[in-house]
Image (cartoon, rainbow, N blue to C red):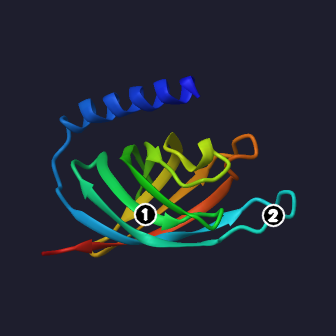
Amino acid sequence: MAKVVCLALGLGCVALARSQENPVAHDIWVNPGFVSYHFPKHNLSFNQLNTGLGGEWRQSSEVSWSAGFFHNSDWARSYYAGAYWTPWQWAGWRWGAFVGLINGYPQMLDGGVFPFLTPVATREWDQWGVGMSLLPDYENRLHGAFTVQVKYKWKP
């Protein structure tokens, strides 16, 4: 766990420093949660439709800050906050990681807050965007999954 915390803090600092080098977009995106596909394991029943509400503020072309809640795969509510750092671009997609804090998973610290790090790929068009991630499997406490999220650019 200490390694994950150190890696998360390190990536967060690098992302913040690098974001100062890129043009600022300041877009605001909203999302209704995501859908997930859990890798078959132990015949467990997971929630695959993870509805909720989230917001994302784009600080630069590489960094955005995100927070929200959703109904997690263990059928409980989770709250999260963190940053996307997507420094690489290929085939119209931005590639990188999400690093932050999350809670609500009963087998992980009894539902308490823990640091989270996962690879991501995002693509944004004029009004719509999509994000994908590959969630890690962690010692029967968190169950690995592939997720897809749709987001909408909010224009006040």
Residue at 44 percent across and 44 percent down: it is 101
Residue at numbered disc 2:
44
Residue at 23 percent across and 64 percent down: it is 28
Residue 17 % position (x, y): 25, 30
Q: Amino acid at mark 1?
A: Phe
Give left or right: position of 5 versus 62: right
Residue 120 % position (x, y): 49, 51
Q: Secondary structure at mark 1?
A: strand
Q: How many marks?
A: 2
Q: Is residue 50 above or below residue 64?
A: below
Q: Secondary structure at mark 2?
A: loop
Please name whichever residue, 149 or 124, is drawn nearer the observer in this view of the structure. 149
Give left or right: position of 126 versus 40: left
Residue at numbered disc 1:
69
User: Label 2 crowding class (10 Å Cα cut-off): few <14, some 14-19, many 20+?
Assistant: few
Give left or right: position of 56 versus 51: left
Residue 124 % position (x, y): 35, 65
Residue 115 is tagged as none
Residue 97 seen in the current view: no
Residue farthest to the right? 42
Residue at 71 percent across and 67 percent down: it is 46
Q: Is residue 71 above or below residue 3?
A: below
Question: How far apart are the two marked residues, 1 and 2, measured between alpha carbons?
Answer: 23 Å
Q: Amino acid at mark 2?
A: Leu
User: Label 1 crowding class (10 Å Cα cut-off): few <14, some 14-19, many 20+?
Assistant: many
